[in-house]
Amino acid sequence: MAYELPPLPYKYDSLEPFIDEKTMKIHHDKHHASYILKLNQTLKNYPELQDKPIESLIQGLEDVSEEIRESVKNNGGGHLNHTFFWSILTKKLIFKGEIFNEIDKTFQTFENFKEEFTKSAMNVFGSGWTWLVLDGNQLKILNTSGHENPITHGKIPLLVIDLWEHAYYLKYQNRKNEYIESFFNIINWKKVNELFLKYKI
Ligand code: MN3
């Protein structure tokens, strides 16, 4: 058994004009695929880890042999983060749900949330991710670097933006702020709401 690249849950051009088809194609077919390839190479001599769901592998990173832990964190994290990222993106969607009440409760207004999330994303230095997570019952915005995933630290991801340059550079070049602004047009709030309802205590 080996990890496999899951197909994108929509077409490469579905997120146009916010994320362009070419970026999606390279990002999914080349970058995401390469993390899986390297993860499988890393686990070649560890058959007991090859059948684990990717979430369990990353959640239990501390139990992974030190020899391969960094590679599992980077490449397994790359696989998990990208799979999650694709799943919370969608074509324009009108949706209302409890997650918005919780956002208002935590950040006062949606605009405040958007502002804080954007600020946090702009502060990611180098390659990383900005997340909305559930920490117990509390919504929090946090950044991780490389391909670290918050589940390693017991927090549950609800939403994420990929801030590696490969995620936006073809279309946006240095205009990272425009990419983040665009991201807010293609969030799958229905999915985020489902996760919130599933994992809130
Ligand atoms: Mn990426």
Image (spheres, rainbow, N blue to C red):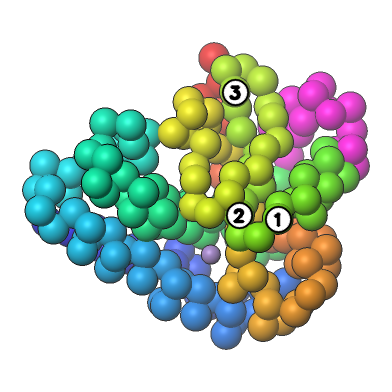
Q: Which of 169 and 111 is in front in this view?
A: 169
Above/below status of 124 relative to 41:
above
- Closer to the chain start, of discs 3 and 2, is 2
The residue identified by callout 3 is 135
Alpha carbon separation for disc pair 3 and 2: 19 Å
CB atoms of marks 1 and 3 within 8 Å: no
Alpha carbon separation for disc pair 1 and 2: 7 Å
Mark 2: which amino acid?
Gly
- The percent coordinates of residue 192 (x first, y second) are 60, 41
The quarter of the rendered structure image containing the C terminus is: top right
Range drawn in magenta: 96-112
The residue identified by callout 1 is 125
Above/below status of 120 relative to 185:
above
Residue positioned 42% across, 77% down in the render: 30
- Closer to the chain start, of discs 1 and 3, is 1
CB atoms of marks 3 and 2 within 8 Å: no
